[in-house]
Amino acid sequence: MITNEFNIAELERQMLNVVRLGKILEVDHAKREVLIKLGENRALVPWPCDIGLNYIRWQPLRVGTQVVLVCSCGDLAQARIVGMLYTNDLPPPSTDEHVDILQFNDGSMMKYDSSKSEMTVKSVGNLTIKVDGDVTIDASQIALNGGAGVVTGKCVCAYTGKPHSDFSNTVTAGK
């Protein structure tokens, strides 16, 4: 009878540990592991990655993040992070259903608002764009620091038939 009682208790323990909530206590970036607090227990867990056909993303995790773990057979040693949750300490950057945001600690961010079809990129520091090929920007209006129309050589003189400078109505720039 002791064996049956043990088996039932072990099955209950396993069932209770299949899905757990935990909190990240420590992060080891070099090993890509996090120490998770699960009630009175702790587990060293590899963190999930985001890998697609055409990209691989490095996403360092943060101490204090609440995580959802799945533990195969209820074994905490086999725990894997399957999700992360917002908390009062780490709230979402927006609750607008039309907005997707990637926000960084220094205030830099990328935001897309599908209700306005508008994308915003904000950098609180320098922004570097490196291109091995050409850059083409087609827009109804391009404003560089405000200002007035940019001089172009696209206009052809009605008298000489040669190009001469003209002010653009599309591109404006400040000094």
Image (cartoon, rainbow, N blue to C red):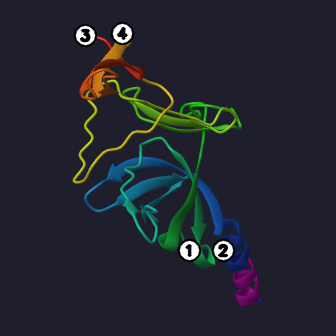
Q: Between label 2 and label 4, give the one nearer the viewer.
A: 4
Which corner quadrant of the image does residue 166 belong to?
top left
Mark positioned earlier in the residue sequence (2 or 4): 2
- The span shown in magenta is 2-8
Residue 55 on the magenta segment: no
Task: Say which amino acid is labelled 3.
Answer: Lys
Check contact, mark 2 vs mark 1: CB within 8 A: yes
Check contact, mark 3 vs mark 1: CB within 8 A: no
Q: Which residue is mark 3?
A: 175
Q: Which residue is mark 4?
A: 147
Q: Which residue is mark 2?
A: 14
- Residue 124, x across and y down, in percent: 34, 24
Task: Say which amino acid is labelled 4.
Answer: Gly
- Residue 76, x across and y down, in percent: 53, 69
Q: Is residue 28 left or right of residue 170?
A: left
Task: Say which amino acid is labelled 1.
Answer: Asp
Q: Tell me how far mark 2 sits from mark 1, CA to CA.
A: 7 Å
Q: Between label 2 and label 3, give the one nearer the viewer.
A: 3
Mark positioned earlier in the residue sequence (2 or 3): 2
Crowdedness of circle 2 by 10 Å Cα count: few (<14), some, many (20+)? some
- Residue 138, x across and y down, in percent: 44, 39
